[in-house]
C-alpha cells in the first residue's frame, strides 16, 4: 500500500506544465493561428471573387435579356441613379463615350451592389471602303451604335413589275408599317425595328478595324495595346479609386485574363462582337431574313410577269395560227382558180384543135399538164389548210389553258412567298406574343 506521504509527493510532481511543455503548446497555437489567419484571408479573397463573379454573371444575363427584348444594349448610367441615361426623344445615349456605371434598375437587376459595376457599350459609326463586283471599292457609311436601335437591315426586293413594264429592283428596308393597320408600328415598334437591325449593327461593327477611341479591351501581355473592340464590357473594381483604365471616360477595359496582383484585383467580363452575334443567333436569322427569303421573294415576284409575258407570247402564236389558216384558205382559193383556168385552157385548146383540123393538137397535151399542176396545187393547199387549222386550234387551246391557270397561280405563289418573307422581317430573332399575332394576321398584298 502507498503511504499518505508518498501520495502527497505524487500530487506535487503532477502540478502544472514544465517550461518545455508550455513552449511546445505556444508554438502549436502560433502555427494554428498563422494557418487560421491565412485561411481566413484566402476565404475572404475567394468570397470576394465569388461575389464579383456572381455579380458579373447576373449582370451579363440581365444584359442579354435586355438585348433580346429591346434589340439594343442599354445606355450607361451617368448619374448613379441605376437608370440608363437616354434621350427619350432621339433614342440616343447622353454619354457619348458609352461608359459609365451599370443601369441595374433599367435591367431589372434587384441588387444595389450592381451599382458599383462599371459598364461600357460599343457606340461606333464610321465609313469603310467595300469592294463591288467589278473590284472597284466604294465608301459605305456603317452604323455600329449598339445602344441605339436604328434602321439597318435592308432586303433585296422588286419595287416594280408588271406584264407591261420592265422589272425594277432595289435594296431597301421593307415598309411593312404601310401595309399594317394604322398605328400598329407606333404601338408595337418591334415589328418594324427589331433584332435583325441590331444584328446588322453587329455585322457593321465586325467589318470595321480596331479603334482605341471606342470600347475595347487591352492585351493581356501588353496592357497598353488595344486587343479588339468589344460589344460590351463589365468590371467590378476591387478598390477605390479604380485603376486608370477603369475610371473616368476611359474606353479601355483590361483583359478578362489579366492576372491578379497586389495592385490589381479587378474582375472583368467582356463580350466580343462575334460572341454576342452567336448568343443572339444572328447567323440563324439575319441570313435567311435578309438574303435567302429576300432572294426567293424577288424570284417569285419576277415569275408573275414572266407568266404574263408567256401568255402574251401564246396569244401571238395563236394569232399567227389564225393568220396561217387564213393564208392557207387563200392559197386553196387560188389553187381552185388555177384549176378553173387550166380547165378553160384545155377546152379552148380542144376547140382550136377541132377548128384547125388537128393542126394544133400538141397544145392539148400542154394544157393537160397545166391541169395536173393545178390539181397538185389544190392538194397542197388543202394539206396546208388542214395543218394551219390544227395549229390554230392547238395554240388556241394552249393559250386558253395557260392564261386560265398559270398567271393566277404565279400570283398566288408570289403573294405567299413575299408575305412569308415580310413576316420573317417582322418577327426577327426573339418575337414576343404581339409580334407573332401581327405577323400571323398579315396578308400580302393588302
Image (tube, rainbow, N blue to C red):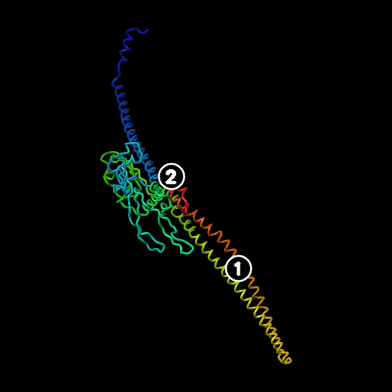
- The reply, left or right, for residue 331 in relation to residue 282 is right
Count up the numbered dots. Answer: 2
Q: Position of residue 183 (x, y in %)?
A: 39, 48
Q: Position of residue 319 (x, y in %)?
A: 56, 69
- Tell me the crowding category of disc 2: few under 14, some 14 to 19, or many 20 or more residues within 10 angstroms, Cα based: few
Q: CA distance from mark 2 to mark 1?
A: 57 Å
Depicted 27 relative to depicted 227: above or below: above
**Disc 2 or 1, which lies upstream in sequence?**
1
Element on which disc 2 rests: helix
Q: Position of residue 393 (x, y in %)?
A: 61, 66
Q: Quadrant of the N terminus?
A: top left
Closest to the observer: 95 or 335? 335
Q: Residue at x 67, y 78 (%)?
A: 376
**Which residue is tagged 1?**
392
Q: Position of residue 188 (x, y in %)?
A: 40, 46
Element on which disc 1 rests: helix
Confirm whether residue 265 shows in the render: no
Depicted 10 relative to depicted 199: above or below: above
- The reply, left or right, for residue 214 in relation to residue 313 is left
Residues at badges 2 and 1 in contact (C-beta under 8 Å)? no
Closest to the observer: 222 or 71? 71
Quarter of the image for residue 378 reads: bottom right
Confirm whether residue 434 shows in the render: yes
Residue 257, labelled with which disc? Answer: none
Closest to the observer: 79 or 126? 79
Depicted 142 relative to depicted 103: above or below: below
Quarter of the image for residue 108 reads: top left
**Which residue is tagged 2?**
434
- Tell me the crowding category of disc 1: few under 14, some 14 to 19, or many 20 or more residues within 10 angstroms, Cα based: many
Q: Nearer the viewer, mark 2 or mark 1?
A: 1
Amino acid at each position: 500500500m502507498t503511504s499518505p506521504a508518498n501520495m502527497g509527493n505524487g500530487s506535487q510532481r503532477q502540478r502544472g506544465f514544465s517550461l518545455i511543455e508550455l513552449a511546445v503548446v505556444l508554438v502549436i497555437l502560433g502555427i494554428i493561428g498563422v494557418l487560421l489567419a491565412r485561411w481566413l484571408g484566402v476565404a475572404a479573397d475567394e468570397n470576394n471573387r465569388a461575389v464579383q463573379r456572381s455579380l458579373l454573371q447576373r449582370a451579363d444575363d440581365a444584359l442579354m435579356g435586355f438585348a433580346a427584348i429591346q434589340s439594343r444594349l442599354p445606355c450607361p448610367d451617368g448619374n448613379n441613379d441605376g437608370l440608363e441615361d437616354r434621350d427619350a426623344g432621339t433614342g440616343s445615349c447622353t454619354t457619348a463615350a458609352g461608359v459609365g456605371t451599370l443601369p441595374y434598375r433599367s435591367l431589372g437587376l434587384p441588387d444595389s451592389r450592381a451599382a458599383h459595376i462599371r459598364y461600357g457599350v460599343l457606340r461606333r459609326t464610321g465609313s469603310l471602303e467595300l469592294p463591288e463586283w467589278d473590284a472597284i471599292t466604294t465608301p459605305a457609311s456603317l452604323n455600329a451604335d449598339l445602344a441605339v436601335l436604328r434602321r439597318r437591315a435592308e432586303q433585296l426586293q422588286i419595287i416594280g413589275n408588271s406584264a407591261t413594264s420592265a422589272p425594277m429592283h432595289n435594296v431597301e428596308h421593307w415598309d411593312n408599317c404601310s401595309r399594317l393597320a394604322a398605328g400598329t408600328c407606333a404601338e408595337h415598334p418591334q415589328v418594324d425595328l427589331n433584332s435583325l437591325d441590331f444584328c446588322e449593327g453587329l455585322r457593321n461593327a465586325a467589318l470595321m478595324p480596331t479603334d482605341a477611341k471606342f470600347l475595347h479591351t487591352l492585351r493581356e501581355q501588353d496592357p497598353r495595346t488595344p486587343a479588339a473592340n468589344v460589344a460590351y464590357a463589365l468590371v467590378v473594381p476591387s478598390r477605390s479609386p479604380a485603376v486608370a483604365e477603369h475610371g473616368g471616360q476611359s474606353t479601355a477595359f483590361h483583359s478578362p485574363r489579366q492576372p491578379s496582383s497586389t495592385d490589381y484585383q479587378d474582375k472583368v467580363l467582356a463580350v466580343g462582337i462575334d460572341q454576342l452575334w452567336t448568343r443572339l443567333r444572328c447567323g440563324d436569322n439575319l441570313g435567311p431574313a435578309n438574303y435567302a427569303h429576300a432572294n426567293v421573294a424577288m424570284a417569285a415576284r419576277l415569275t408573275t410577269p414572266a407568266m404574263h409575258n408567256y401568255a402574251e407570247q401564246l396569244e401571238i402564236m395563236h394569232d399567227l395560227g389564225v393568220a396561217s389558216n387564213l393564208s392557207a384558205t387563200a392559197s386553196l382559193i387560188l389553187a381552185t382558180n388555177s384549176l378553173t383556168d387550166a380547165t378553160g385552157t384545155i377546152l379552148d385548146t380542144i376547140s382550136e384543135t377541132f377548128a384547125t383540123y388537128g393542126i394544133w393538137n400538141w397544145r392539148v397535151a400542154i394544157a393537160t399538164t397545166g391541169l395536173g399542176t393545178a390539181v397538185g396545187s389544190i392538194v397542197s393547199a388543202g394539206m396546208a389548210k388542214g395543218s394551219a387549222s390544227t395549229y390554230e386550234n392547238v395554240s388556241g387551246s394552249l393559250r386558253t389553258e395557260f392564261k386560265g391557270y398559270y398567271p393566277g397561280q404565279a400570283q398566288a405563289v408570289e403573294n405567299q412567298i413575299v408575305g412569308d418573307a415580310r413576316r420573317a422581317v417582322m418577327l426577327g430573332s426573339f418575337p414576343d406574343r404581339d409580334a407573332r399575332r401581327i405577323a400571323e394576321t398579315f396578308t400580302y398584298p393588302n
